[in-house]
Amino acid sequence: MASHQSQRFKAGETKGHTQEKTEHAMGTVKDKATEAKDRASGTAQDSTAQKTSESAQAAKERAGEAKDNTGSFLQEKNGAAKEKASDAARYTKETAQAGAQKMGGILSSAAEQVTGAAKGAVDAVKHTFGMVGTGDDPTHDTD
């Protein structure tokens, strides 16, 4: 029986050693899996950070291009607006000059008419009061 107990003892001892080695191996595998996971996570974070940086750079470049395009667009519109304002000012000046010339002609004609009417009135008043001399009255008969 002693041999049987000895075998059972050795079997139990072997089982204990095997269990211990299995647990140790499982711990090692678990540690390596954790390290691999951490490395993968770090790589993913690095990759994500790199992609974020690249996206930010691309967005910055697109914003610069948009700014340049906007600046060009505004310069074109500003130039067109200046040209239209210049054309409008030129038209206004020409119209004002033409109006002034026309008004000058009208005023000159009106002044002549007023002067003629005033002379006629003066002659009528002179004639009424008998102040018209022989040289002054064109209707006076000198015979």
Image (cartoon, helix red, strand yellow):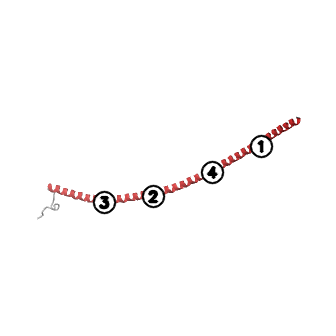
* Residue for badge 3: 102
**Residue type at mark 3?**
Lys
**Residue type at mark 1?**
Ala
Q: Residues within 10 Å of mark 1 (few under 14, many from 20)?
A: few
Tell me the CA gap for discs 1 and 2: 81 Å
* Residue for badge 2: 80
Report the residue that reaches farthest toward the left: 143
* Residue for badge 1: 25
**Residue type at mark 2?**
Ala
Q: Earlier in the sequence, mark 1 or mark 3?
A: 1
Q: Earlier in the sequence, mark 1 or mark 4?
A: 1
Disc 4 is placed on an element classified as helix
Q: Is residue 93 left or right of residue 42?
A: left
Is there any visible trace of residue 14 in the rendered image?
yes
Tell me the CA gap for discs 2 and 4: 43 Å
The residue under the point 78% across, 42% down is: 22
**Residue type at mark 4?**
Lys
Compare residues 56 and 13 and report the one nearer the observer: 13
Residue 1 falls in image quadrant? top right
Tell me the CA gap for discs 2 and 3: 33 Å
Tell me the CA gap for discs 3 and 4: 75 Å
* Residue for badge 4: 51
Residue 74 image point, x, y percent: 49, 55
Disc 1 is placed on an element classified as helix
